[in-house]
Image (cartoon, helix red, strand yellow):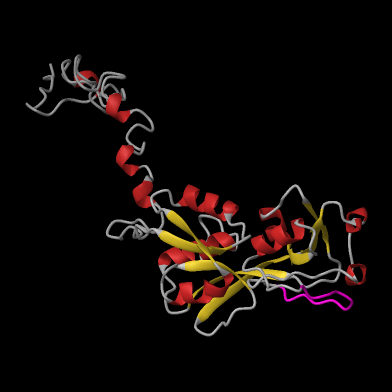
Amino acid sequence: MPRRATPKPGRPGKGTGRSRGTPTRAQRPRHPSPKPGSAAKPGSAAKPGPAAKPGSAAKPGPAAKPGPAAKPGSAPGSQAAPAPPPGPFRLGAIEGATPGKWIDIWRERMPRTPLELVPLAVAAQRDAILSGEVDAALVRLPIDRDGLHVIALYDEVPVVVFPADSHLAAADELEAADLAGEVLVAARDDVLGFEASGTRAPAFDPPETTKDAIATVAAGVGIAVVPMSLARLHHRKDVAHRPLRGGPVSTVALAWDADRTTALVEAFVGIVRGRTANSSR
């Protein structure tokens, strides 16, 4: 009777001769199964925590938001724009000038820098600028421009001032020919130098000021030709005025010392020229 072959220890036999406790290759799992309670439980390690929420870590924090420090010209290390000089800014103005709108803009843009309005006589306008009495001035042309910067602003219409009951009041506009036979009164501070053929010179000394000349006209002694702003400034119930067609205009200008173009002067020049608060020169 033949002997049955006994398998060698550690070497499983063929077919069903393998040990029952040893799984076959087909039975062996390729990867070990996760142990219960381990980090490999479905959804346990993969669950996004609060710090892992989509977009949370990428959101820019307050420090990353572009604030004032990130604006052009204000990067770290840059210096802030210097504050304007404390002033005051002294603006001279001849009689009849109308700087009101520019003064309003100045006070809106530069509330901490006061503007002082200094009345000037036409005869003294140049000296007031060069002596430093004013920083800039609204003047009447012509003016000696030597040593000055001058910007013409606007022209004033000439008008004829006459007694309220004069026959000249019948017209809406007058010409030089309409003034024939009238006594032409011109003050010492006259700025137009108007002359007309057919008019007569007064038999008395010229009045000192335009206001005096208009008072003389109101007394029924003649007529005066002045810029419209002066006629309105010195208006009286006993006088009237009409535009003079073809008469000499009076130009109002801004002038300042060419050697003293300060930051405040530049600021006022910008306002007069219509620059906005953010405009550059």
Left or right: residue 52 versus residue 154 is left
Pick the residue in front: 13 or 44: 44
Q: Which residues are magenta?
A: 192-202
Image: 192 above or below 22: below
The single residue placed furthest to the bottom in the displayed view is 146
Q: Determine if the magenta segment contains residue 223.
A: no
Position in image of residue 209 (x %, y %): 63, 66
Image: 277 above or below 244: above
The quarter of the rendered structure image containing the N terminus is top left
Position in image of residue 74 (x %, y %): 35, 56
Image: 56 above or below 165: above
Position in image of residue 37 (x %, y %): 19, 15
Pick the residue in front: 61 or 249: 249
Left or right: residue 55 versus residue 280 is left
Residue lying at 34% horizontally and 60% vertically, measured from the top left: 82
Q: Main secondary structure of the magenta part?
A: loop
Where residue 172 sits, quadrant-wise, is bottom right
Residue lying at 29% horizontally and 56% vertically, measured from the top left: 76
Pick the residue in front: 149 or 270: 149
Q: Determine if the magenta segment contains residue 201.
A: yes
Pick the residue in front: 118 or 111: 118
Position in image of residue 64 (x %, y %): 33, 43
| Labels in figure, total | 0
The single residue placed furthest to the front in the displayed view is 203
Left or right: residue 150 versus residue 229 is left
